[in-house]
Amino acid sequence: MKLYLDFEPCDECKTLIKELSESDLISDEQEKEEESAKFLRHLTYNHTEVVKAIIKDVPIQKKRQEFDWFK
Ligand SMILES: [Zn+2]
């Protein structure tokens, strides 16, 4: 999962991002998913402005995909 977000990460974010980048080395898919889920949960509770930005971006990406589909 690659997410490029424009926001100020707090100390916990930095720890979680570090864990996430290290989890690329883990072959266990479930463990990777747990790391991602942990980070998203932290964003949901502590950085609502980031979550709002993600939700705002998602429909745009979906429209682009649908457009490609009909080409
Ligand atoms: Zn944070």
Image: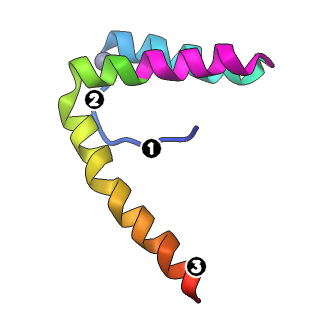
Q: Could you say which quadrant of the image residue 5 lies in?
A: top left
- Identify the image quadrant of the N terminus: top right
Name the residue that disc number 2 marks: 8
Position of the C terminus, as image quadrant, is: bottom right
Q: Tell me residue 9's x, y (percent).
A: 32, 24
Amino acid residing under circle 2: Glu
Q: Name the mark on residue 69.
A: 3
Specify the quadrant of the image occupied by residue 41. Answer: top left
Task: Give the amino acid type for the residue marked by disc 3 in the picture.
Answer: Trp
Q: Earlier in the sequence, mark 3 or mark 2?
A: 2
Residue bearing mark 1: 4
Element at badge 3? helix
The three-letter code of the residue at mark 1 reads: Tyr
For ligand 1, give the image quadrant.
top left
- Element at label 2: loop
Give the alpha-carbon distance from disc 3 to disc 2, as whole Å: 36 Å
